[in-house]
Image: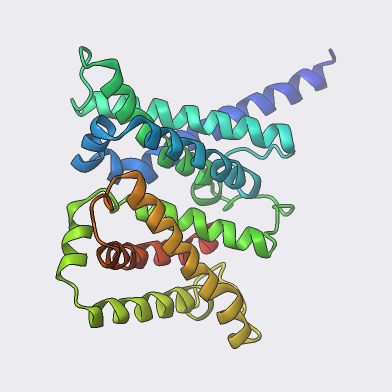
Amino acid sequence: MSAAARLLDLRRERAYVADLGRAFAGALVFSIPLLMTMEMWEQGVIMNRWRLLAFILAGLPLLYGLSYYAGFSKRRGLVNDALDTAVALAVGFVTASALLILFGVVEWNAPPREALGMVALQAVPGAMGALLARRQLSGDGGGDTDEEEASYVGELFLMAAGALFFALNVAPTEEMILIAYKAEPAHALALVAVSILLLHLIVFKAGFAGQEEADRPAAAFLHFTLPGYAIALGISLFALFVFGRIDGHSVAGVVQTVIVLGFPAAIGAAAARLLV
């Protein structure tokens, strides 16, 4: 191997180490609120393991999609995106394990089922942070001029990713149930209207860097805002199901809780397209 080739390999290795370090930073920044939430600790212990498995399996295509559109390294292609997904998930597991042990939440003598449950539940949001790290934490904002441009389906996918991340921060808490219980039907309808309005304004009207240009506001509302809100509601229902927050509740109670959680999920759906 020539000296030039060795130098190139060394630069690539150093760049990957820097990407990996940034991935850990992203996992830490994005998952700290969840890692320090008592309800998430409890859910890791009491959650039915088939629901936990469903959550992780649902997270895998989401993580792969984030790797495709962002990724913590500059490597591109089917295999590299899959490798980035696997590494990001490993980063999420390591970050969650280290911090939960540091916080004294996971003890060395804890039953493996409980320890693994708490860590596995936190790994997916940590992996999301790892995959978004290059876009949000690198000095050049992601760097490449050949980043993948999202298609219409890709735009909706990114909304789903943002909705899930925001929903995860509050879905396991008792406050979601309390707010839904206290809200009257008029409050729920007003919350729907405000959620849709904010989603549209954040993406198209707020003037943030990276926002979309809406040449036809009505078409943008019909093709992005309303589907985005529907996705936020679907993600909210999924998150509430995973955490067992809809078990034993009436249909009206479930709808009301989904609408309440749909508010932060809608904000996440809007913010995701600005971040990725």
Left or right of 93: which side holds 153? right
Q: Is residue 109 above or below residue 58?
A: above
- Which residue is rendered at x = 29% and y = 43% of the image? 34
Q: Residue at x 39, y 45 (%)?
A: 30
Residue 159 in the image: above or below residue 70: below
Quarter of the image for the C terminus: give it.
bottom right
Is residue 6 or residue 226 the one in the foreground?
226
Image coordinates of residue 118 in percent, x first then y, are: 30, 30
Q: Nearer the viewer, residue 53 or 203?
A: 53
Instruction: For residue 205, say whether it is visible.
Output: yes
Residue 272 located left or right of residue 166: right
Instruction: Answer above or below: position of 195 versus 107.
Output: below
137, 124: nearer the viewer: 124
The percent coordinates of residue 147 (x first, y second) are 70, 52
Q: Position of residue 10 (x, y in %)?
A: 68, 22
Tell me residue 149's x, y (percent). 70, 58
Query: Looking at the rendering, which quadrant does residue 263 occupy?
Result: bottom left
Front residue of this view, candidates 26 and 151: 151
**Residue 37 is at least partly visible in this image:** no
**Left or right: 166 as drawn, with respect to 275:** left
**Which residue does the image show at 54% across and 49% down from the upper left?**
139
Residue sitting at x 58%, y 35%: 85
Task: Name which quarter of the figure residue 29 lies in.
Answer: top left
Count of numbered tags: 0
Colour treatment of the image? rainbow
On the rendered image, what quadrant is the N terminus found in?
A: top right
